[in-house]
């Protein structure tokens, strides 16, 4: 039997970018705009890891004028406060809704803290694979999200410095979804698709 040789330009496990130390990754703009077209909100909206401010910008574009951002590093004009969300006491008043693309390594902590703080909804951009992994799926089952909006096509989420350098996102390799928790909801989650083109 003949041997078939395949050339690879780079190893399959190679990363296009080095991991950002703060896990600062930026979603494509359609991801946020489509969320606010699809999901209803009442009251203020805070992004506690606002980065470049795309979530805040999309919320305001959709008519949510009370949307604001904060982050532990000021990276844009949409950052109203420089504070670490996990230790913030919200003395000025807690937001009704928290919507965020949290730092991946702290995403569970962000969800848990947001669910204690937000009066209405918590919406987090997280890997879709969380619904099938044993440990995370059990945790999700306990927390009872109301909806999971599966993003299609897969969004690209390069690190912030790559976006600031002018690099354009290309095809994403990881599946993502918006996970939506509503205060007081204790039923089964609903699954739907959130497409770039409605």
Image (tube, grey):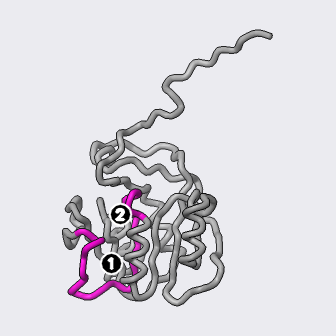
Picture quarter with the C terminus: bottom right
Classify residue 71 as left or right of residue 171: left
Question: Where is residue 186 shown, x and y percent of the image?
Answer: 59, 86
Q: Residue 102, can we see it?
A: yes
Residue 165 belongs to the span the image colors magenta: no
Residue 99 lies left or right of residue 133; in this view the side is left
Against 103, is 145 above or below?
Answer: below
Callout 1: 10 Å neighbours few (<14), some, many (20+)? many
Going 37% across and 53% down the picture, which residue do you hit? 25
Image quarter of the N terminus: top right
Q: Element under label 2?
A: helix
Magenta stretch, residue numbers = 84-107
Picture disc at residue 17: none
Q: Nearer the viewer, residue 161 or 15?
A: 15
The residue lying at 34 percent from left, 71 percent from top is: 47
Q: Which residue is mark 2?
A: 54
The tag earlier along the polypeptide, 1 or 2, is 2
Report helix, strand or loop for mark 1.
Answer: strand
Tell me residue 153's x, y (percent).
58, 53
Q: How far from the left and from the top, in percent, is residue 14?
A: 46, 33
Rendering quarter of residue 83: bottom left
Q: CA distance from mark 1 to mark 2?
A: 11 Å
Q: Residue furthest right?
A: 1
**Foreground: 73 or 84?**
84
- Name the foreground residue: 85 vs 168: 85
Which residue is under mark 1?
Answer: 67
What's the residue at 31%, 65% (across, down)? Answer: 50
- Decide: few, some or many residues near mark 2? Use Cα within 10 Å; few <14, some 14-19, many ≥20: many
Examine the rendering and report whether any part of residue 198 can be seen: no
């Amino acid at each position: 039997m003949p041997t078939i040789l395949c050339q690879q330009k780079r190893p399959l496990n190679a990363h296009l970018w080095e991991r950002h130390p703060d896990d600062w990754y930026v979603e494509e703009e359609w991801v946020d705009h489509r969320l606010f077209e699809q999901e209803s909100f009442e009251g203020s909206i805070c992004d506690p890891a606002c980065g470049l401010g795309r979530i805040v910008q999309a919320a305001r574009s959709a008519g949510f004028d009370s949307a604001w951002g904060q982050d532990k590093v000021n990276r844009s004009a949409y950052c109203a406060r420089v504070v670490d969300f996990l230790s913030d006491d919200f003395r000025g008043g807690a937001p009704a809704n928290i919507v965020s693309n949290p730092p991946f390594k702290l995403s569970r902590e962000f969800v848990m803290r947001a669910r204690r703080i937000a009066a209405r909804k918590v919406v987090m951009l997280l890997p879709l694979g969380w619904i099938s992994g044993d440990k995370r799926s059990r945790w999700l089952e306990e927390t009872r999200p109301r909806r999971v909006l599966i993003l299609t096509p897969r969004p690209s989420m390069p690190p912030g410095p790559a976006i600031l350098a002018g690099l354009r996102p290309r095809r994403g390799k990881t599946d993502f979804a918006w996970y939506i928790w509503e205060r007081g909801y204790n039923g089964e989650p609903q699954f739907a698709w959130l497409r770039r083109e409605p």
